[in-house]
Amino acid sequence: MATTADIRKGFAFEYEGKIYLVIDFQHVKPGKGGAFVRTKLRNLENGNIVDMTFDSGKSLNEIKLERNPFQFLYRDGEEYVFMNNETFEQISVGEDILQEKKFYLKENMDVTLLSVGDRVIDIDVPIFVELEIVETEPGVRGNTVSGGSKPAVCDTGLKVTVPLFLNVGDKIRIDTRTGEYVERVQ
């Protein structure tokens, strides 16, 4: 049995007959009253995001997740096909499981799939990915690094805000934790 002290991102547990995955959490110790943990959870049965608060020290039934290395091969409609790096077995994962992480997937990228039994419940992508800008307003002479910003669309469909000096065809590095532009890649 785990307690609220064990809560961290990626922690999976069963609560009131449902399986949840911790997306975000915050330990709170108010000046008055007992400490508690505020969490943002994904219900793994239906994909809904819920906010829950637990009193400090509450027991939780932890579920062990399997982490397996896979390689992203290609997209097939609303399904994404991955290959196990050890057994070469291929599996398909739906957009409903990948959610926003689908925008960071490039062909032949190594990722980690999290599963409970035979069911894939989440994916870990690298912290930084390199994407190409396919749509943005043209840069204007005189725009500098310290200037303003403009919207851009990357080759995976990700919409991101970039500096004015970037143009279509430029490669950029994106932080997958925040979804924000980091730097231009040469």
Image (spheres, rainbow, N blue to C red):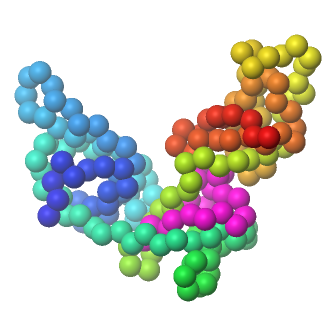
Q: Is residue 46 left or right of residue 34?
A: right
Q: Is residue 58 left or right of residue 12?
A: left
Displayed quadrant of residue 179: top right
Residue at the front extreme of this rendering: 186
Q: Quadrant of the C terminus?
A: top right
Residue 37, given in percent of the width and then of the height, sits at: 22, 40
Residue 46, given in percent of the width and then of the height, sits at: 43, 61
Q: Residue at x 74, y 52 (%)?
A: 156
Residue 63, given in percent of the width and then of the height, sits at: 28, 67
| Residue 110 appears in view | yes
- Which stretch is magenta? 95-115
Q: Residue at x 62, y 77 (%)?
A: 83
Q: Residue at x 60, y 61 (%)?
A: 95
Question: Is 64 drawn above or below residue 102 in the view shown?
Answer: below
| Residue 79 appears in view | no
Q: In the depicted view, which residue is nearer to us: 59 or 184? A: 184
Displayed quadrant of residue 118: bottom left
Q: In the depicted view, which residue is nearer to us: 34 or 87? A: 87
Residue 162, given in percent of the width and then of the height, sits at: 73, 29
Q: Quadrant of the N terminus?
A: bottom left
Residue at the left extreme of this rendering: 33
Q: Residue at x 57, y 72 (%)?
A: 70
Question: Is 2 drawn above or below residue 135 in the view shown?
Answer: below
Question: Is 117 drawn above or below residue 126 in the view shown?
Answer: below
Q: Is residue 52 left or right of residue 170?
A: left
